[in-house]
Image (cartoon, helix red, strand yellow):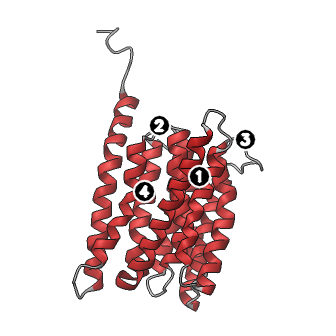
Amino acid sequence: MPTPQELLLTVLLPAFSAALVACVGAWRRWSFVMPLAAGVAFLVAYACLGLPKLPPSDGSDWLFWLAIPLTLIAVVDSLTTPRFGWLLGASAGVVAFVLLKPLPDVPRQTLWMTTVVFAAAGLLLTFTASISQPRLGSLWTLAPFCVVTAGAGVLILSSDSRTIGMHGLAAAAALGPVVVLSARLRTARSVTLLVAPLLAGLLLAGHFYASVTCTQMSLLLATPLLLVPVAFVPFKRVWLRGVIALLATAIATAAVTTPAARAAKKAAEYDPYADFYK
């Protein structure tokens, strides 16, 4: 389990940093501030846990450096609002390529196939946010992404990677205030251009640098897609569709993370010498 100091750096610090910046965006109705708030807060929390070198010695630390251009892409999208901006979600493939390239035991075919698959996953996630935003609003579109990102952090923490797991929690904490404060703004797609590649990168790092299984990784990546059918449920009240979407993604996320968290807790409590002293 993370120490109180680590929780302060990975949860309270990014949440406070994001809220501080996002409040300005909500007050001035500046949509571009929301992805900036999430990105800056994530980078601050990451750096406080240990600023990685460039190039980093640990391949998973590329997430820190990749978060910078991803934040800029999201900010530019929110300023220009191109019709097909969701196509920029393919940057998740670039994240996958950069994370896996330093690993010497990854075959070239696996590297390129993973890059293509994650580019497609990023496109699906950002397209999901793009078509859900008009029906649900930014708050109810982004809230499930926040839940899944937090679930990814818990899953990775339970899979023998303390550091990557805490970065996942930091990403979720940075997104939380943005979710709430972007309720009156149309910024869900732009924020997702940052969150979706980060989520994909965290899960991929959890798989190749820890013990997250392909099934767990795939299920969590697919969970935000539940937004699509819920968004088109013929309910007049937007908040009702939003609550259903949030509950559906929370249940699906819990179904993946809870068994892993229980197994990790059981392993931590296990005493290998218990039988010896009987």
The 10 Å Cα crowd at callout 3, few under 14, some 14 to 19, many 20 or more, is few
| Image quarter of residue 125 | bottom left
Q: Which residue is mark 1?
A: 96
What amino acid type is highlighted by mark number 4?
Leu
Q: Which residue is mark 4?
A: 221
Residue 35 or residue 270, whichever sits in front: 35
Q: Is residue 22 above or below residue 93?
A: below
The 10 Å Cα crowd at callout 2, few under 14, some 14 to 19, many 20 or more, is some
Q: Position of residue 91 (x, y in %)?
A: 60, 63
Give the spatial CA distance, label 2 vs label 1: 17 Å
| Image quarter of residue 242 | bottom left
| Mark 3 element type | loop
Q: Residue at x 39, y 85 (%)?
A: 134
| Mark 1 element type | helix
Disc 1 and disc 4 in contact, CB within 8 angstroms: no
Q: Position of residue 177 (x, y in %)?
A: 49, 72
**Picture disc at residue 171:** none
Give the spatial CA distance, label 2 vs label 3: 20 Å
Give the spatial CA distance, label 2 vs label 4: 16 Å
Q: Is residue 74 above or below residue 109?
A: below
